[in-house]
Image (tube, rainbow, N blue to C red):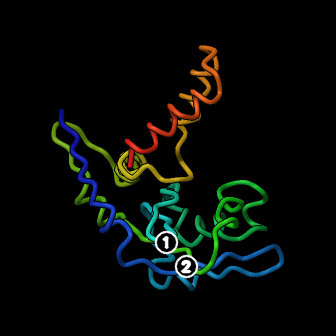
């Protein structure tokens, strides 16, 4: 069996983006900012100032980009969860941008031989691979795991921070 995942370069991942505004509590967020993509499914890449901040996916056939991004960009819909609090800390300008890999894009980027994946399974696989490839600032979970492990080994905090700084430099 073979599973092949082609991950486009970072520059491609942040190209053809649209600006998506944050909506503080009480302000309506409208999916119209996404244009024709609002009803589609796939993987989205949130970036700011050319730096990838987050990679996410629509959750299934009934979850569109519009529905999913509302939960990320509208404070009331996020209800203190998701990534809204992190997005709210970003300085604007520059605007927060979102790029998309549609289900059709992912069908071309994720191929199999000797096995079958449906379109939503391919979306899940692509999202996971994109997170590992792009190392988004808001999804650096491996750094927390490594820091916790170093703490358990009783590595002093200054040494832990230095080790993590090297890890961050090498993963860019």
Residue 43 drawn above or below residue 37: above
* Residue 49 at x, y percent in the picture: 49, 72
Q: Residue at x 53, y 36 (%)?
A: 143
| Mark 1 element type | loop
Kindly indicate whether the residue at mark 2 contacts the one at mark 1 (C-beta within 8 angstroms).
yes
Q: Residue at x 48, y 56 (%)?
A: 55
Residue 138 marker: none
Residue 49 marker: 1
Image quadrant assignment for residue 72: bottom right
Q: Residue at x 57, y 21 (%)?
A: 150
Residue 75 drawn above or below residue 79: below
Residue 93 drawn above or below residue 98: below
Distance of mark 1 from mark 2, alpha carbons?
6 Å
Image check: 25 left or right of 82? right
Residue 154 drawn above or below residue 131: above
Q: Residue at x 55, y 62 (%)?
A: 63
Image quadrant assignment for residue 50: bottom left
- Classify 10 Å Cα crowding around label 1: few (below 14), some (14-19), many (20 and above): some
Image check: 45 left or right of 94? left
| Mark 2 element type | loop
* Closer to us: 20 or 109: 20
* Residue 109 at x, y percent in the picture: 24, 57
Name the residue carrying label 2. 94
* Residue 16 at x, y percent in the picture: 36, 78
N-terminal label among 1 and 2: 1
* Residue 95 at x, y percent in the picture: 56, 79
* Closer to us: 92 or 39: 92
């Amino acid at each position: 069996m073979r599973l092949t995942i082609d991950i486009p370069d970072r520059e491609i991942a942040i190209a053809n983006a649209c600006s998506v505004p944050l909506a503080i509590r009480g302000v309506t967020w409208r999916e119209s900012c996404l244009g024709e993509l609002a009803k589609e499914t796939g993987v989205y890449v949130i970036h700011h100032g050319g730096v990838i901040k987050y990679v996410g996916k629509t959750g299934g056939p009934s979850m569109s980009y519009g529905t999913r991004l509302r939960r990320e960009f509208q404070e009331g819909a996020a209800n203190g969860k998701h990534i809204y609090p992190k997005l709210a800390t970003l300085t604007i300008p520059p605007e927060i941008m979102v790029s998309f890999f549609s289900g059709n894009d992912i069908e071309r980027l994720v191929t199999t031989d000797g096995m079958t994946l449906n379109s939503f399974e391919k979306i899940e696989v692509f999202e996971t691979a994109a997170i590992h490839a792009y190392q988004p600032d808001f999804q650096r979970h491996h750094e927390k795991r490594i820091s916790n492990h170093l703490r358990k080994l009783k590595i002093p905090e200054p040494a832990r921070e230095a080790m993590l700084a090297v890890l961050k430099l090498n993963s860019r």
